[in-house]
Image (cartoon, rainbow, N blue to C red):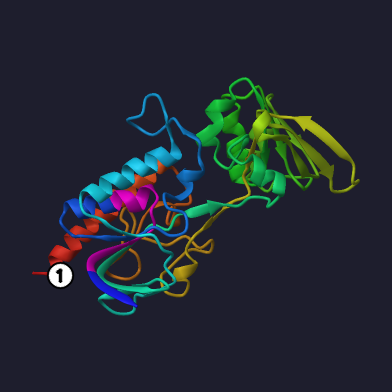
């Protein structure tokens, strides 16, 4: 078992974790960053990113994360390309363990992110990022004057559908029940919108299309009451059935809300344990954007730097 001590341990390598690494390494705190099983986080599964500042021509998700990683590495961040298996936050220094490494740290920044919930179909996996997305804010622009679908029935699905009307020529909202679970005001906006059609009592039976032939072409729907099948032609499908924060590691250790998002002090990133900070999508169920994740990564790093300085007085 390899052992080492660092001033700061960062868990997670998306925009939040890497930004925290840039700031803490520039502050000479010599952070160690655990990249996990998906280095770069959710952005590495995104093809084109057009709304991240500083890239007027757009940038691919993997390229953006690689450049950010190189920036953190340049300032002295140590990278561990392993998944964290356990943490001990009961005493300081804190302990972070992988299968063959144990790191102690004076402060910990958690940036483990979240993952969108999908339906779990083979055709969905095949067409993800080839017409299937979980973020209308990220990808809606690509469907200008095209027909799209949104899967879900809550406020998130309603919001996604309404947002997509800015670009798409038609939005079909697919919901398995005969009434939406969204708030009354959101339901009214959806039902009254001339660009939105609701496919009631319907579920996705199959996504139709091939990445090699232009991606998603349509969706086969199944009526849950009659069993009838029908196909609709769409170029984009947005799955809006929720997100799952990657916080299982901290269950019964840190305060979290009912959905599993880590709770932090208002306007800050400090968690329920002094010296432990949470940033990015593992603590944010509202914005879920790369730029806001990076912003909270910066906040966490600054809070850590000031907290460590206070400990030394």
Query: Where does residue 6 sit, x and y in percent of width and height?
Result: 23, 67
Who's the residue at 29% across and 79% down the image? Answer: 91
| SS under mark 1 | helix
Q: Which residue is mark 1?
A: 311
Judge whether residue 120 can be spotted in this image: yes
In the displayed structure, does residue 89 sit left or right of residue 107? right
* Front in this rendered view, residue 247 or 38: 38
Count up the numbered dots.
Answer: 1
Quarter of the image where the C terminus is located: bottom left
Q: State the residue in front, 195 or 50.
A: 50
Q: Which x, y percent locates residue 106?
A: 23, 70
Q: Does the magenta-highlighted stretch encompass residue 51?
A: no
Relative image position of residue 182 (x, y in whole percent): 64, 46
For the N terminus, the image quarter is: bottom left
- Which span of residues is magenta-colored? 6-20
On the rendered structure, is 113 left or right of 125?
left
Image vertical order of residue 228 relative to residue 27, above or below = above
**Which image quarter: residue 169?**
top right
Q: Residue furthest left?
A: 313
Q: Is residue 152 above or below residue 274?
A: above
Q: Position of residue 293 (x, y in %)?
A: 38, 47
For image coordinates 44% across by 39% down, the residue present is 61
Query: Compared with residue 285, is residue 199 higher up or lower down, i.e. above or below?
Result: above
Residue 131, image quadrant:
top right
Residue at image point 29% right, 45% down: 70
45 to 193, vertically: above or below? below
**Residue 291 in view of the camera:** no
Foreground: 46 or 152?
A: 46
């Amino acid at each position: 078992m390899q052992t080492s001590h660092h001033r700061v341990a960062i868990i997670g390598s998306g925009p939040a974790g890497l930004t925290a690494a840039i700031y803490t390494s520039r502050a000479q705190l010599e952070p160690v960053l655990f990249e996990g099983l998906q280095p770069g986080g959710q952005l590495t599964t995104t093809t084109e990113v057009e709304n991240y500042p500083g890239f007027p021509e757009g940038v691919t998700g993997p390229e953006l994360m690689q450049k950010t990683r190189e920036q953190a590495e340049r300032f002295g961040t140590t990278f561990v390309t392993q998944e964290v298996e356990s943490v001990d936050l009961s005493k300081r220094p804190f302990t972070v363990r992988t299968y063959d490494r144990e790191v102690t740290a004076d402060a910990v920044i958690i940036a483990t992110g979240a993952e969108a919930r999908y339906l779990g179909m083979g055709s969905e996996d095949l067409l993800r990022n080839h017409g299937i997305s979980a973020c209308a804010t990220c990808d809606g622009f690509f469907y200008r004057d095209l027909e799209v679908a949104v899967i879900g029935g809550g406020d998130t699905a309603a919001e996604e559908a309404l947002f997509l009307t800015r670009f798409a020529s038609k939005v079909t909202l697919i919901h398995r029940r005969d009434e939406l679970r969204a708030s009354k005001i959101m339901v009214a906006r959806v039902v009254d919108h001339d660009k939105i059609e609701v496919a009631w009592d319907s579920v996705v039976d199959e996504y139709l299309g091939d990445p090699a032939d232009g991606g998603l072409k349509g969706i086969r729907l199944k009526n849950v009451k009659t069993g009838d099948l029908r196909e609709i032609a769409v170029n984009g499908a947005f799955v809006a059935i929720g997100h799952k924060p990657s916080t299982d590691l901290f269950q019964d250790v840190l305060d979290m809300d009912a959905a599993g998002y880590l709770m932090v002090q208002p306007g800050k990133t400090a968690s329920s344990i002094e010296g432990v900070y949470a940033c990015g999508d593992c603590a944010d169920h509202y914005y879920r954007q790369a730029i806001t994740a990076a912003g909270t990564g910066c906040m966490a790093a600054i809070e850590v730097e000031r907290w460590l300085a206070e400990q030394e007085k």
